[in-house]
Amino acid sequence: MRLVRKQPGSEVSQAFSVAPAQYADCANPSIGSRALSTEAFVFVGRHFSKLISDHYLEGFVSMAKSFFKITNKDELAQLISDSKRKPVVVFKHSTSCPISSRAYREMEQVNGDVSLVVIQSARDVSRALEQVTGVRHESPQVIVLKDGKAVWSASHYDVQAGAVAKAVEANS
């Protein structure tokens, strides 16, 4: 795959060429067809090559189709309100954590909407979610909200698409 910089002249090289098989070795799912957040890592094999920001790769990749990025407290308040009509899934993701990368790939398998809070770019949202729900912050973490309250949560290796689906179904 070849990623070409839209604007000329930056501290990041103009193009990155990384073989598709090398994407599997990335510790961050931000490259390829997966979501970008505050930071993305480009790896050559298993060796770190360059740290770059969303700004440099903007327009090259898109978030998973069922993910909706939550970036401020107003959007969080809307989620809490929405949870009065149906269960809401919130996924707290760290772009620098390999365990969170695995959880991200797992959450891509969830049918339905997933509200994504990227910890590095939305710390205030993460803190507010902890205050509202009483669920201690962890990352990666999934919280299912119903009627404005946390009814289920999981973190780290317990983040499984099937478990999330069962939690949503049990609270529908």
Image (cartoon, rainbow, N blue to C red):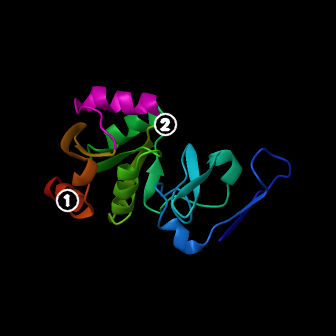
Q: Residue 120: which numbered mark, if any?
A: 2
Residue 120 x, y percent position in the rendering: 49, 37
Judge the density around disc 2: few (<14), some (14-19), many (≥20) Cα neighbours within 10 Å: some
Residue 117 on the magenta span: no
| Quadrant occupied by the C terminus | bottom left
Q: Which mark is residue 84?
A: none
131 drawn magenta: yes
SS category of the residue bearing label 2? loop
**In the rendering, at what x and y percent does residue 10 appear?**
80, 46
Quadrant occupied by the N terminus: bottom right
Q: Does the residue at mark 1 contact the one at mark 2 (Cβ under 8 Å)?
A: no
**For mark 1, what is the residue?**
163
Residue 95's place in the image compared with 106, above or below, is: above
Boundaries of the magenta span: 120-139
The answer to which of marks 1 and 2 sits earlier in the sequence is 2
Residue lying furthest front in this view? 47
Which amino acid type is shown beneath numbered disc 1? Ala
Q: Position of residue 121 (x, y in %)?
A: 51, 36
Q: Is residue 113 visible?
A: no
